[in-house]
Image: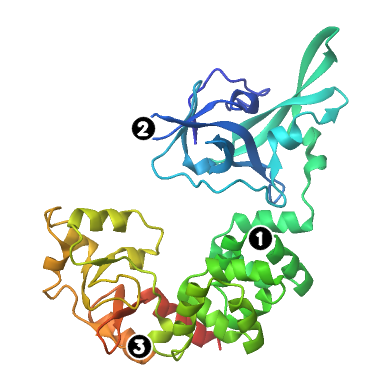
Amino acid sequence: MTDTEHDADTAGTDQRTVLWATRLLRRAIFDADGSTIGSVNDLVLLPGTGGRRPRLQGFVANVDRRRIFVHESRVDAVDRDGLHLRGGTVDLRRFQKRPGEILVAGDVLGTSTPRGPVTDVGFVERADDDGLWEAHQIATAAGGRLRRRSLDFAGWDTIAARFQPDRVAGQLAALRDMHKADAALAIQSLPDERRAEVAAALDASRLADLLEELPEAAQAAILSTLDPQAAVAVLEEMEYDDEIDLLKELKAVDREAFLAQMPPDEVIRLRSLLSYQEDTAGGMMTPEAIIVDGETSVAEAIARLRDTELPPALAARLFVVEEPVEPPTGRFLGSIRLARLLREPPTHTVGDLTNDQDDPATLSPTTPEGEVAAVLARYDLLAVAVVDEQERLVGVVTVDDVLHRLLQRGRK
């Protein structure tokens, strides 16, 4: 996030520009095209770690009468008009305050001090030049309606003690600053009671990411500490292959209890995947891939590959089938690399591009994991189709799946 409003104040001898919260509250939010999409309702702070001050995590925005969260990394610039976002879509899920988070308007403004209530919070870019902004100072106001109000300024440390996180919130703050692989190891190393508290406080999506980095036995142990509804929410956020591995690790009674709380169509898909042996292509594959029928245009196919949150290994290849396109699909026609699509006229159909050597191999659901790894290596593939006896596409195995399986076996 860059600040283009340079008439902001500076604090003492510190010449860094101070960005005041009240200059952002109620300001407009613009998308990358310059259209107004909402306004700033609040600022979200994340507790600092290692003695640091709280940092600006993002903004609560009013968009179409809905309060949503906009991460600070999405903000390209701040000026007198408001916040200007980078390109990309906005997550429209309703904002929910997480443990340890501090809201400037909701929690800090109005806090009483000997000099009067806090009326503003000033932010500066952190001294280590990592692009993040931290709470640096506060403004307070003395007086009232019957006498002139006087402003006073002080460092954030003046009120810092009131916003110190408890032990769980502090641990959550530390985890949010870590890569998911490092965060997974950190949560695994916690004492049992603390690990259960932290797991319960993490949102389902983040906990799912962390569990996917751990051995299945450790995943099952953490999942067992959650209440059933929260555990199901975490399972539904996991990648299919990781979810299947975890479900297989659970006791049958626990697995059936979780499946009973899921949508029927999802349960049918999961039971189909659970039927495959763990050390086969079927046991490693995921049904989540970009799958289209042969009449799809190249332009539409590229758009599908571009507008996805799938892992890179899956987003780099398109799988073409006869209808239906949901696994198990109609007859598998072939797959096409994104690089190949970019060289083709946008009006051509993808069905015309599958009759060459761009797609040299497929796997059977019963293919042993060693042979799966050999095929991916032999043809230098990031992902390979798994096809059943009726020539239907039932899933895709990626090189990430193979590496994950081999690493898990190495830990046992």
Q: In the displayed structure, would residue 89 be above or below residue 310?
A: above
Question: Would you say 119 lies left or right of 203 here?
Answer: right
Residue 275 visible in the shown view: yes
Q: Secondary structure at mark 1?
A: loop
Amino acid of disc 1: Leu
Q: Residue at x 64, y 70 (%)?
A: 231
Residue 186 point in image, percent of width and height: 65, 67
Residue at image mark 2: 33
Mark earlier in primary sequence (2, 3): 2
Q: Which residue lies under the disc numbered 3? A: 365
Residue drawn at the location 83% of the way across and 17% of the way down: 142
Asked which secondary structure carries label 2, the reply is loop
Vertical arrangement, residue 56 with respect to residue 337, above or below: above
Looking at marks 2 and 1 on the same chain, the residue that comes earlier in the sequence is marked by 2
Foreground of the two, 178 or 296:
296
**Residue 102 position by quadrant:** top right
- Could you classify mark 2 by the number of other residues whose Cα lies within 10 Å: few (under 14), some (14-19), or many (20 or more)? few
Q: Earlier in the sequence, mark 1 or mark 3?
A: 1
Query: Dot 1: within a 10 Å radius of its alpha carbon, few (fewer than 14), some, or many (20 or more) residues?
Result: some
- Hey, which residue is sitting farthest front in the picture? 264
Q: Which residue is mark 1?
A: 202
Q: Residue at x 35, y 92 (%)?
A: 366
How far apart are the two marked residues, 1 and 3, measured between alpha carbons?
35 Å
User: Eyeballing the image, is 221 above or below 296?
Assistant: below
Residue 59 image point, x, y percent: 58, 38
Q: Amino acid at mark 2?
A: Asp
Looking at the picture, which amino acid does disc 3 mark? Pro
Q: CA distance from mark 2 to mark 1?
A: 34 Å
Spatial CA span between label 2 and label 3: 46 Å
